[in-house]
Image (cartoon, helix red, strand yellow):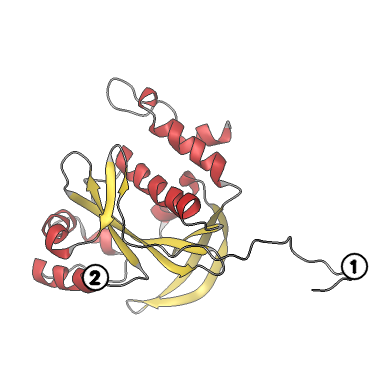
């Protein structure tokens, strides 16, 4: 390491690697994330993600809508065997029904960088408290249990709902990677977002305040927006 004080260098960092995520269960009040099991989860997820007016769910995901449940189960059976991306099913806490999935991916323990991606939220999960809680549980596990310092979110730059979700959840937009990928024969510019370990305490406090029972009115609606809570901290 250079001893010349005129040369700008980054701050020293603990170089002990983060832990690689393993199949586990992340328990919440509204949802739990569990290792994806095609035999257990495929029937519910296929039914909730296929049919009239549901093709949009697959617009920005790599696989296309599947012709039948057998093809769906075969694809996800293979996906569930991988360590990266590491696939979780999102289950309703009270019913055990699978209503979505998400992964940890592009896992770099030596650099302490990990990404959340391959997110499928069916209509049964969208705009629910469980939808936000699932992302809270995954972020908390990455920072607090596994020791990552950078948590990434990437999406197709044209995917406005995903970009809005990243901002709402507390990620910072970092820019575009132009002509980054070819997906389903089409160009993809990729929008990059990140949440850092130094930012996590504030983001965590906002998540927990938003998820608290006292932030819900008698009709089940949130009283304060997540963004507003975080901005006030």
Percent x, y of residue 23: 31, 61
User: Which quadrant of the rendered structure holds the C terminus?
Assistant: top right
Q: Residues within 10 Å of mark 1 (few under 14, many from 20)?
A: few
Give the image quarter of residue 105: bottom left
Residue 97 in view: yes
- Sequence-first disc among 1 and 2: 1
Q: How many marks?
A: 2
- Residue sitting nearer the eye, 187 or 70: 70
Give the foreground label among 1 and 2.
Answer: 1
The residue under label 1 is 6
The residue under label 2 is 64
Element marked by disc 2: loop
User: Where 29 falls versus 141 (above or below)?
Assistant: above
User: Where 72 falls versus 131 (above or below)?
Assistant: below
Say if mark 1 contacts mark 2, CB within 8 Å: no
Left/right placement of residue 183 relative to residue 13 reads left
Left/right placement of residue 90 relative to residue 117 reads left
Q: Which mark is residue 211?
A: none
Percent x, y of residue 14: 64, 61
Give the image quarter of residue 52: bottom left
């Amino acid at each position: 390491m250079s001893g010349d004080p005129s040369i700008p260098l980054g701050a020293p960092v603990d170089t002990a690697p983060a832990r690689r995520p393993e199949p586990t269960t992340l328990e919440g009040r509204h949802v739990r994330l569990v290792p994806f099991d095609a035999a257990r989860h495929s029937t519910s997820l296929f039914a909730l993600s296929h049919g009239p007016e549901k093709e949009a769910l697959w617009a920005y995901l790599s696989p296309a809508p599947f012709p039948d449940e057998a093809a769906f189960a075969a694809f996800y059976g293979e996906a569930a065997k991988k360590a990266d991306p590491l696939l979780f099913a999102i289950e309703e806490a009270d019913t055990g029904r699978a209503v979505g999935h998400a992964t940890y991916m592009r896992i770099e323990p030596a650099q302490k960088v990990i990404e959340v991606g391959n997110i499928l939220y069916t209509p049964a999960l969208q705009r629910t408290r469980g939808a936000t809680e699932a992302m809270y549980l995954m972020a908390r596990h990455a920072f607090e249990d596994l020791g990552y310092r950078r948590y990434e979110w990437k999406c197709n730059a044209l995917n406005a709902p995903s970009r809005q979700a990243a901002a709402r959840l507390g990620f910072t937009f970092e820019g575009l990677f132009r002509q980054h990928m070819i997906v389903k024969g089409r160009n993809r510019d990729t929008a990059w977002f990140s949440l850092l370990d130094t930012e996590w305490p504030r983001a965590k406090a906002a998540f927990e305040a938003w998820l608290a029972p006292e932030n819900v009115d008698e009709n089940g609606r949130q009283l304060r927006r997540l963004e507003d809570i975080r901005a006030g901290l």
